Amino acid sequence: MLRGITNFWCSIFILPKAVIKEVEKICGAFLWNNSVLTARGAKVNWNTVCSPKQEGGLGLKNLVQWNQACILKFIWLLFSKAGSIWVAWVHEYLLKGRSFWTINLPADASWGWRKILNLRQLARRFIQHVPGDGKDIYVWHDFWHPSGPLLEVYGTSIVRDARLPYQAKLASVINGSFWQWPPARCPQLVQIQMHLFDIYPQEGEKDTVVWVPSTSGSFKIGQTWHWLRRRQDRKIWHRLVWFSQAIPKHSFISWLAVLNRLSTRARQKQWTPTISDTCILCNGSPETNEHLFFKCSYTRRIWQQLSSMLAIYHTWLERNRRFHQQLFKVESMIVQDIQFEVRSRILGFSQPNSSLLPMGIACKWGLETIVKH
């Protein structure tokens, strides 16, 4: 619910950094401690948690990047000239015929307008223009030329050399469907005009604005966020941990196990050297992540009967039961627990698909009745 409320406010204005920090602190405390009172005990870095599942995270969104993606929509609306009162008001009273990219930040600017202007450098690479009649495109400030925004590429001297106004519109150098630039007085203008052979003005057609991160050319918040976020390498194991029929608590423990972030005895010994690091299941080797789930004789007997990622969750559950409650279960009981949980999960589906469940697998999980019917 907190994330939902935050998403609402993210879509309205840039949240203060202190607010974002506090929200992430509360979310982290709830994730790791099931309580908002303390944020201690985090097992995975928050930046990793906020990565997509296929990149090793939990699929949460970094609030700073998501907030920026939401507010970039307002900049898109200014250029796409969506029929809203806010857009008309900004053009009439704030821009006043000037380019959004070059207006100075007014001393009396509202907090919201100030934050939008501060995002200009970020938004610059996302907005491109396709010339039509050129009436809505600024010659020097907008990204319509293959080289980029001409003022950024060539500097202010190009304006003087071209003998065009600083706020000139592209329509001033278009005559019907042809270009009509002043004679080139410097090599830079020659270079600019050489690239115009691949750009064709369209008489009577409106200029088009393209949002680069979107495949459709229109603003899409999800695709914009993907452009803003830091990408990680794709993890080959993510489909083993996260899939549509998975039991969430099992996937979560498996995720921690794959990242080697579970508090095994070997890890605890690094913090408290006086404790024993012997595996509590077999009383043999040190209880490392690899030993506990794959080399321990107790765990191997479970794997031999059930080649399932659920074994990781139930092995960890048994380990904690012995460590904290001094209660023990033999391997056969763990296998029965796993079978019962899988059977309950499948029977909980609204329409179990018997055609995709071979008899051998059905018998293994006690689901023969589904296949027979």
Image (cartoon, grey):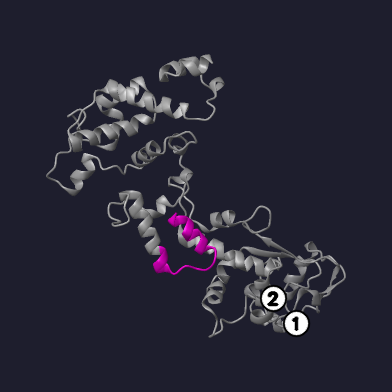
Q: Quadrant of the C terminus?
A: top right
Q: Which residue is mark 2?
A: 140
**In the image, 44: left or right of 277?**
right
Q: Which residue is mark 1?
A: 164
Q: Which mark is residue 207?
A: none
Marks 1 and 2: CB-CB under 8 Å?
yes
**Secondary structure found at label 2:** loop
Question: Residue at point 50% right, 19% down?
Answer: 370
- Is residue 16 rendered magenta in the image? yes
* Name of the residue lying farthest toward the left: 274
**In x, y percent, where is residue 210?**
69, 61
Disc 1 and disc 2: Cα gap in Å? 9 Å
**Secondary structure found at label 1:** loop
**In x, y percent, where is residue 71?**
56, 65
Amino acid at the residue labelled 2: Trp
The answer, for residue 147, to whether it is visible in the render is yes
User: Where does the magenta region start and end?
Assistant: 1-20
Label located before the other in sequence (1 or 2): 2
* Total numbered circles: 2
Question: Residue at point 71% right, 84% down?
Answer: 160
Q: Please, is residue 191 above or below residue 228 in the view? A: below
Q: Please, is residue 189 above or below residue 273 in the view? A: below
The answer to which of 28 and 62 lies nearer the viewer is 28
**In x, y percent, where is residue 261?**
31, 44
- Crowd class of label 1 (few under 14; some 14 to 19; many from 20; radius 10 Å): some
Q: Quadrant of the N terminus?
A: bottom left
